[in-house]
Amino acid sequence: MNKKGHVLNAILLALGLGVILTVDPRSFEPTVDSAFLLAQKIGQLSLPVVLGALFPDVDTAFGKHRKTLHNLPVLAIFLAFPLVFGNLHFVWIGVATHYVLDMVGSKRGIALFYPLSPQEYDLPTGVATSSKHADSVTVVVTVAELGVLAGVHYYLFSLDVSLADAAATFTAVV
């Protein structure tokens, strides 16, 4: 995707993730307090999710685009960062969804296993980044990403807990 697509993806993710983490669909009652909590959560998520969603494209300034910062080792660093330093908990979601958008939404894939392999992986669902359909594809992919995140949050483990707690919960379930 292009920069506009990644910004759109990040904004929609922050909004959607704010709703997912704030609203319990089984017991939600709209009130002024719940609206305030939702706005507060969206505000807390916006910066880390947007930073994560835009970070992989820094490799356009150096290295090899869609290789240097578009791979699983980089994602692992962002997953480990909160475990080691105790902050930037939602940056990894922005990075991971950037990868999904580049693999599913655009014709060119990403080198998931770089530097071990320069092979780029993608799905045949993408469009050219200059396509008039790029924004529509971005929205569809983002809605799918939010669906997956909601499923994880509601049925596997809360995304609003530390990754260490989530890993422990996931291990206990499996």
Image (tube, rainbow, N blue to C red):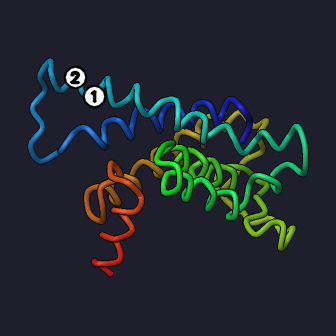
Residue drawn where x is 35% and y is 77% of the image: 171
Q: How many numbered discs sit on the rendered protein?
A: 2
Q: Position of residue 79 (x, y in %)?
A: 54, 57
- How crowded pointer 1 is (Cα within 10 Å; few <14, some 14-19, many 20+) is rated as many
- Which numbered dot is residue 138? none
Q: Which residue is mark 1?
A: 38
Residue drawn where x is 76% and y is 52% of the image: 69
- Separation (CA) of disc 2 from disc 1: 5 Å
Residue drawn where x is 79% and y is 55% of the image: 108
Q: Position of residue 135 (x, y in %)?
A: 62, 34
- Direction from residue 116 to residue 35 in the image, left or right: left
- Label 2: element kind: helix
- Label 1: element kind: helix
Do tag 2 and tag 1 residues touch (Cβ < 8 Å)? yes
Q: Position of residue 154 (x, y in %)?
A: 26, 56
| 23 to 118, vertically: above or below | above
Q: Is 160 in front, or is 57?
A: 160
Q: Position of residue 45 (x, y in %)?
A: 43, 34
The amino acid sitting under disc 2 is: Ala
Residue drawn where x is 57% and y is 50% of the image: 97
Q: Residue furthest top?
A: 32
- How crowded pointer 2 is (Cα within 10 Å; few <14, some 14-19, many 20+) is rated as some
The quadrant of the image that shows the N terminus is: top right
The amino acid sitting under disc 1 is: Leu
| 112 to 10, vertically: above or below | below
- Direction from residue 4 to residue 85 in the image, left or right: left
**Residue 19, quarter of picture:** top left
The quadrant of the image that shows the C terminus is: bottom left
Q: Which residue is mark 2?
A: 35
